[in-house]
Structures are given as structure tokens and as C-alpha cells.
Image: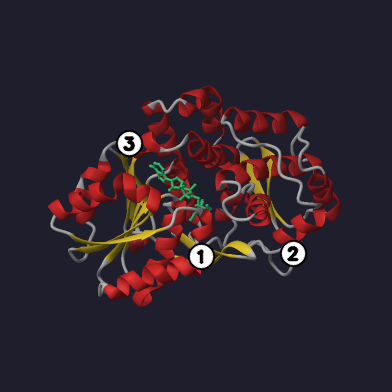
Amino acid sequence: MHTVQVALADRSYPIYIGAGLLARGKLLAQHLPQNRAALITDTTVAALYLDRVAEALGAAGVSVTKVVVPTGEQHKDWRNLNAVFDTLLANHCERKTTLVALGGGVIGDLAGFAAATYLRGVPFIQLPTTLLAQVDSSVGGKTAINHPRGKNMIGAFYQPLAVIADTATLNTLPDRELSAGLAEVIKYGLIRDPAFFAWLESNIEALIGREPAALAYAISRSCENKAEVVAADEREESGARALLNLGHTFGHAIETGLGYGTWLHGEAVAAGTVMAARLSQHLGLIGAPEVARVAALLERARLPVNAPDLGVERYLQLMGMDKKVEGGRMRFILLRAIGSALLTAEVSRDALAAVLAAPVAHA
Ligand code: NAD
Ligand code: GLY
């Protein structure tokens, strides 16, 4: 087991990474303020892992309330948030009852927001079971539900007490979901870790082939990167954390524009990352070889590099909902090299329109 620490003073917490961790009930139980937990998951993950986790917790002396919501991005909404509250209230879950998110980023975000708001805030633990959740969404305390007008529009910053990433759960993950997670892994290399990007270029086929050592390294290195960024700018105030949003302004527009769940989040981020790279090229920050290098790695990860053609006006309307908009101006994460990114509002409408007008063509 490898442990990465998220350093946030009295709210610091460990990320445990290793195979078979879901069966280790005491690893989770040691973090509980009360021997009660509500396990929140989706129908797909429930069939695979819910009983295993409930039994492991039972053996560690923890009584469990099970909460199962429908699978899918389109269900990360206020209806299912309310359904979670219904079950918690019906079972008299208390202020010291810990909400445990068992699943991918949809469950982590939904359960995390439930934890932030139920009884004005209850303890929370993440058990991520997708690659995307193990490398990104379970770490850092961003929780949210979607609104029909925009992704993740309603939420809270709320840190977990611990993250327990059982890498063996990735054995049951569909190929398409594994690739979606790689989009966020590649992101860390692009924004701040050129050596990791080069390692990914050498090892992407090993990751696609689910070689355990390669996956374990990619997850650990991603978590180290994310932990450093979150420790530096927990609430996305200085601009450091905003860099984690490379490709997301475009990606969220794709997800909302096509309808939640049509493209996976990681797929939308991949195509959005190529758009961000092309915008960076348009502004003279990087050249065509860098754009080609970005697109080539994403393609080898079996991710889409061509965005859907939603039309310039629709893209602009959707991107206007971005949470980074400040004083009415959109702000973008751009690349100034492989391994270095910046946040800027200095993007002309012409440059943006040029990228959006031909979203299916890349360098
Ligand atoms: P997801 O939670 O929908 O999981 C993907 C699919 O895999 C689902 O069908 C799920 O049921 C299934 N699944 C989960 N674990 C499995 C396993 N081990 N075996 C088989 N199937 C499994 O999607 P995701 O890609 O994990 O997360 C995407 C979400 O995360 C988006 O809503 C995105 O906005 C959010 N996100 C949040 C943050 C953050 O910082 N909070 C960061 C990135 C993404
Ligand atoms: N996934 C972006 C962030 O955590 O800030």
C-alpha cells in the first residue's frame, strides 16, 4: 500500500492506494467518529462491491446503511441528492454517521455534497472505484451536482477524512471508462509534470493493458500532483488549482451541450484539452509540434481528440456558464509548454471563434 498525504492543516488526510483495500474494514473504520456509516453507491457498483464493503465494515464493528442511486452522469442531480437525504433521514443517520462514497466521480461528487449539507455537515470518506475517481475526483474536496444549465453548478468544497483507492476494482472497469480516466492522468503531465508526461508517452500501452505496476505508478503520481495543488490552493482562489481545469471549459460545454452522459466526462476533457492546445497555438504560446504531441498521446489512450460541432454561438453560450468566469469575462487554462500551464482572460473572441468554428479539425 502506498500513502499520499493531502496537507491541509487540521483537515489533512491520507490517500491509501493499493490492491484489495476494500476488504480491509479496519483501514476505513479507524477514521470513523462513530461505529455507523452510510454507504452510498450506484446500481452498477452496488452489484460488484457493496456487499463486500458492507461485510468488511460489519466485521470491523461498523453498522451500515446502504443507499443506492441509479448509475450515470444524468443522475448527478437534485432528485438523487434528495433521494439520498430521504434514506439518511429514514434511517436516523446522525451528525457523527460517516457518509462513504463507493464508486466513480458521480457518486463521489453527489455523496460529498450530501455530506457537506446533511445536518449542516457530516463526516465523509471516499472509496473511488474508477480510474478517474482514483486519480482526480476523490481527492481535493470538490463536491457538486449538475444543473440543466451547467456542469457541477451547485456544490461545496468539503474534504473527506480519507480516500481509500482499491486498485483491484479497476479490473472490472470497462475499457471506455479506463480511457476516460487517462484523460485526467495526462492532464497532470501537461499542466505541471513534464517528466510524467514523458513517462506516459512511454507507458500508455501498459496503462491501456492494465499492467498493475504501471497503473499503480500513474495513480500515485497523479495523486501526488493533485495533493500538492490542493494544498497550495484549496478553494481555487490563487489560480493554482484552476490549472487542474485544463480542457474542462470546453469539456463541460460538450457534456452539457450533448446532454449529460452522452460523452463521458474524461472523453469531453480529452477533446477539450486538444481545443485548449489549439487555442494556445493560435495565441502563439506553443507550436504545432506540441499540439500534435498532445493529440497523439490522447489518441493512443483511445480518447476522442475531435470535439463535436455544436456551433460557435452555442459553445460560447455554454462556456459563459463556466465557474471561472470573473467580472463577466471567460478565463482559460492554456499551455505554454508541455508541462506548464497558465490561467488567462486575455483571449480574443476571434481566436476563440477560430478554434470553435472548426472543432473537428486539429493540428
Ligand atoms: P462515473 O462515476 O459515472 O463512473 C463511470 C461508470 O463506471 C459508471 O457507470 C459506474 O457505475 C461504473 N463503475 C464505477 N466503478 C466501477 C468498477 N470498479 N467496475 C465497473 N464499473 C464501475 O464516472 P467517473 O468517470 O468516475 O466520474 C465522472 C464524474 O466525476 C463527473 O461527474 C465529473 O464532473 C466528476 N469529476 C469531479 C472531480 C472533482 O474534483 N470533484 C474531478 C473530475 C471529475
Ligand atoms: N478536478 C479539478 C479540481 O479538483 O480542482
Amino acid found under the numbered disc labelled 1: Asp
Q: Quadrant of the N terminus?
A: top left
C-alpha gap between disc 3 and disc 1: 29 Å
- Residue 358 appears left or right of 332: right
Asked which secondary structure carries label 2, the reply is loop
Which mark identifies residue 77?
A: 1
User: Residue 34, percent across and down?
Assistant: 19, 66
Residue found farthest to the right: 350
Q: Report if residue 328 is visible in the image.
A: yes
Identify the mark at residue 329; answer none if there is no mark: 2
Q: Is residue 91 above or below residue 195?
A: below
Foreground label between 1 and 2? 1
Q: Position of residue 357 (x, y in %)?
A: 83, 47
**Residue drawn where x is 64% and y is 47% of the image:** 247
Find residue 170 and report its horizontal and vertical position in percent: 38, 37
Compared to residue 89, the image places residue 41 above or below, namely above
Q: Is the residue under label 2 in contact with that under label 1 (CB below 8 Å)?
A: no
**Viewer can see residue 158:** no
- Which secondary structure, mark 1? loop
- Judge from the rendering whether residue 121 lies leftward or rightward of residue 307; answer left or right: left
Upstream in the sequence, badge 3 or badge 2?
3
Q: Residue at position x 25%, y 70% from top?
A: 96
Marked residue nearer the N-terminal end (3 or 1): 1
